[in-house]
Image: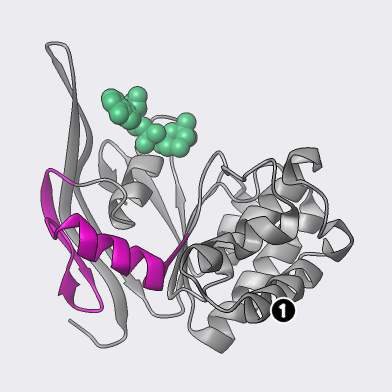
């Protein structure tokens, strides 16, 4: 494995049992993601994009296959070490973003660091900087439940980036955004990729955004092509 490789998935498969039926969602997925690379994943609804992101992020487990992160095997590692891996290496943006509606935008962004017991003042500064970058500084003290769908999506992006992960896994992060906001998200990710070696794997239906990334892969019949 090349030292420039961040993530390497080999022959990853996943099936779900539904009564007597077995639905094979992933059927031998292979993927190599380089450091600083930004890759789009497209595919029909139900093709397994979310399943794949969850497996690559170790939130779900594959039935078979290998997942190497910086050369270390993650498949079938104990949950405690996977949790530590996720905390220090991965930022997630979920398809349904799961912000905490009772907390403010600023608190939601700080939350991953607060859970880890990191310094509050440093987290606050970093969260405010991210809020400025996504043009939501004026909304810092609004409860997230009172923000628009697109604003919540940008808050979820900032939350995913607060701990400066090596890998961002993003499940349709621009689904509720207009073209201008989508472009802003893209520019922010590109800058982080350049300056902090961030790699991005992004599920998107936005073809314009997909084309702006380094590569686009299509999930089809359980394979990435
Ligand atoms: N926990 C589960 N149990 C059974 N089947 C599941 C489970 N999770 C997902 N599936 C099935 O796996 C397939 C892939 O689901 P997945 O959510 O990965 O699709 P997707 O590509 O993200 O779709 P969308 O674009 O609509 O978000 C679907 O047919 C879904 O019904
Ligand atoms: Mg999905």
Figure quadrant of residue 175? top right
- Magenta part of the protein: which range? 62-91
Q: Residue at x 80, y 43 (%)?
A: 147
Q: Residue at x 55, y 62 (%)?
A: 160
Q: Nearer the viewer, residue 121 or 179?
A: 121
Q: Pointer 1: residues within 10 angstroms few (<14), some, or many (20+)?
A: few
Residue at mark 1: 125
Q: Whole-percent x and y of residue 26?
A: 23, 40
Q: Whole-percent x and y of residue 185?
A: 69, 63
Q: Is residue 102 left or right of residue 92?
A: right
In this picture the colour scheme is one colour
How many numbered discs, if any? 1
Q: Residue at x 70, y 73 (%)?
A: 124
- Residue 84: in magenta span: yes
Figure quadrant of residue 186? bottom right
Which residue reaches farthest right? Answer: 138
Q: Residue at x 58, y 60 (%)?
A: 111
Q: Whole-percent x and y of residue 23?
A: 20, 24
- In this rendering, the answer to whether 72 lies above or below 51 is below
């Amino acid at each position: 494995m090349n030292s420039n490789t961040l993530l390497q998935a080999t022959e990853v498969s996943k099936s779900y049992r539904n009564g007597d039926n077995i639905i094979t969602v992933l059927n031998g997925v292979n993927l190599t993601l380089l450091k600083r690379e930004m890759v789009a994943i497209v595919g029909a609804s139900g093709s397994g994009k979310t399943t794949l992101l969850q497996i690559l992020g170790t939130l779900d487990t594959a039935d078979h296959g290998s997942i190497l992160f910086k050369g270390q095997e993650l498949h079938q590692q104990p949950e405690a070490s996977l949790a530590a891996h996720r905390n220090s290496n991965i930022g997630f943006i979920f398809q349904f973003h799961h912000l905490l509606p009772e907390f403010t935008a600023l608190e939601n962004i700080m939350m991953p660091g607060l859970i880890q017991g990191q310094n509050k003042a440093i987290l606050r500064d970093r969260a405010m900087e991210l809020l400025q970058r996504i043009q939501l500084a004026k909304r810092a003290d609004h409860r997230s439940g009172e923000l628009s769908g697109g604003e919540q999506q940008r808050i979820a992006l900032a939350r995913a980036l607060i701990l400066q992960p090596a890998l961002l896994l993003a499940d349709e992060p621009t689904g509720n955004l207009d073209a201008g906001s989508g472009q802003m998200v893209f520019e922010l990710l590109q800058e982080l990729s350049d300056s902090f070696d961030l790699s991005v794997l992004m599920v998107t239906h936005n073809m314009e955004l997909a084309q702006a990334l380094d590569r686009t892969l299509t999930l089809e019949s359980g394979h990435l092509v």
